[in-house]
Image: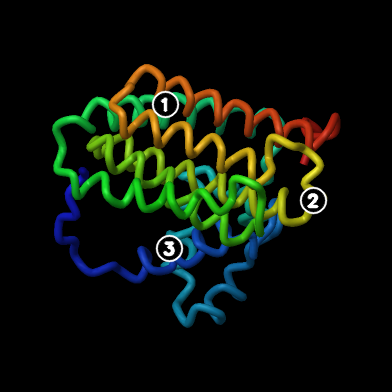
Amino acid sequence: MVSAAAEPPLSVVDRVAAELRERIKRGEFVGGQRLFEAELTSDLGVSRGPVREALGRLASEGLVVVEANRGAFVRRLRAKDIVDLYEARAAIEGQAAALAARRAADCDQRELRELRELLRENEEFLRGGEFAPHLRVSERFHHLVLELADSAILDRLGRQLHVLAHHLQTTRIVRSTLSEPQLSVAATARWHHEIGTAVLRGDDDEAGRLMRAHLFETRDGFLALDGPKAGGQS
């Protein structure tokens, strides 16, 4: 598992970037919303310098768009963005699932205990349930697969993409009628059960295949949810 090495204290810019990243992730800032530096400095109790630098950092991560003479805006995910996001997640997390399964036979059993416990939590959602508590279990599942892969690069890239995916989920699903069955709590829980089971039995080909199929189905669900206007201009 990726080791949790001691890290230096966060700088002001780090703290501001982390707070803004979390607000975008939770859907408090919606796609296309302008982020005013003056409001953020007042709200966060910092000067404009750290806010401006933090916004630049989030722009490099794809969460924010900075336009000359207009300012910073939360990135609005269109159809092409959704396709790109889930193709990247499928590549990264499919490989991570395969690596996690490959390590299962030899790694310390304590590393697998949390996965077993998480799959037990996941069982309560196999027939459906509330979206918010399931989203927490779902996010932890995907993070855990990245950790079990024991690849610092896959872990870092995967977690960065999770912020965009979480933002997409909270702004699309919570505000929708959940009309697409592949986005349902039960459907996601079934995928996680199958992927986790493949990891635990050490079937790397199947774990990777299932993870990719899960993420591609999720992609298609979001595209269907947005409909033909998904690719329109911002």
- Mark 1 Cα within 10 Å, few/some/many (few <14, many 20+)? many
Residue 227 percent across, percent down from the top left: 83, 33
Residue 201 percent across, percent down from the top left: 31, 29
Q: Identity of the amino acid at label 1?
A: Gly
| Above/below status of 34 relative to 113 | below
* Mark carried by residue 94: 1
| Above/below status of 166 relative to 14 | above
Q: Residue furthest right?
A: 228
Q: Identity of the amino acid at label 2?
A: Ser
Q: Quadrant of the N terminus?
A: top left
* Mark carried by residue 176: 2
Q: Identity of the amino acid at label 3?
A: Ala
Q: Quadrant of the C terminus?
A: top right
Residue depicted at 40% across the width and 36% down the height: 196
Residue depicted at 15% across the width and 55% down the height: 5
Answer with left or right where residue 136 lies relative to residue 7: right
Could one spot residue 57 in this view of the protein?
no
Q: Nearer the viewer, residue 203 or 47?
A: 203
Work out how far the residue at label 2 is from the one at label 1, CA to CA, in angstroms. 28 Å
Q: Nearer the viewer, mark 1 or mark 3?
A: 1
Answer with left or right where residue 175 lies relative to residue 208: right
